[in-house]
Image (cartoon, rainbow, N blue to C red):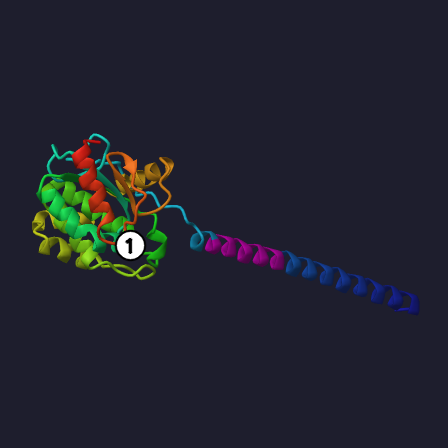
Amino acid sequence: MGKQQRATSRKAQAAIVAQRGRQINWVLTVGGLIIVGLVAAIGIVAFNATNNDEPTAGSGKLVTPANLTSTGAIPVGKPAAPVTVEIVLDYMCPACGKFEQANGGELDRLIQAGTTKVELRPISFLDRTSQGTRYSTRAANAMATVADRAPDKVWAFNNALYDSQPQEGTRGLSNQQIADLAIQAGVGQAVVDAFDERIFEPWVANVTEAAFASGVQGTPTVKINGTVFEGDVYRPGPLTQAIEAAAKSGT
């Protein structure tokens, strides 16, 4: 092979090597872009999952509990009572727990006396604060099941859930703990067994959406005969006085 031929061969080999190098670099570049894209996508999904403040709608068919009021609340007390106290609540809400501590005993007395009836609207906007266990939904679903199948035990079960209320930010009570509280409140085993069927979770999601669509800004929201109570709900006295005044005035 002459010098000119050897030179030409070396140039050809160099060109082939260079071409292969460009191909490898292209593959690596494209592969790197794909990996970066996947990482970014995973990051976006993770961010959205951890920053989603919207209540998670229950899956399955929408089933409304029996024994509700005409406006869709869970009733407690005598229908003929002159005063209606409506409470929008979340069983994970610490402010709701304080409200219950301050007013639960007086509400119980006024219910027994026939002065007031209570309408409960359990919602689930604090699901995001129970480390993924959706405690607010699980507790509200259990309450809806009791309202549907053992309505005379609603108030006792409501009080039991507050007496054992978990701290916000924890995993909340387990399904078994919720069931145990219901049994202690006098709910029958057949009703308690239905908690795990999650029948009323879609209803809980609907109630939650409807509450905020109606102007509710947080829990507890308390109304007396349809008017938002603006007094102090975290100490005994003001709510009782307002209820008794409404009973006397008939408004």
Crowding at mark 1 (Cα within 10 Å: few <14, some 14-19, many 20+): many
Q: What residue type is labelled 1?
A: Met
Q: Quadrant of the N terminus?
A: bottom right
- State the quadrant of the C terminus: top left
Q: Where is residue 211 in the image (x, y as percent from the top left)?
A: 33, 39
Name the residue tied to disc 1.
92
Q: Which residue is depicted at the point 33% across and 52% down?
A: 127
Image location (x, y in percent) of residue 206? 31, 38
Can residue 150 be seen by looking at this rendering?
no
Left or right: residue 5 versus residue 114 is right
47 w.r.t. 209: above or below: below
Is residue 79 found left or right of 241 in the rendered image? left
| Residue 221 painted magenta | no
Of helix, strand and loop, which mostly describes the magenta segment? helix
Residue, x 11% and y 32% (percent of image)? 80
How many discs mark residues in the rendered view? 1
Residue occupying image coordinates x 26% and y 37%: 61
Residue at disc 1, secondary structure: loop
Q: Position of residue 115 (x, y in %)?
A: 13, 39
**Residue 194 pos. (x, y %):** 15, 47
- Please state the extent of the stretch shown in magenta in the rendering: 31-47
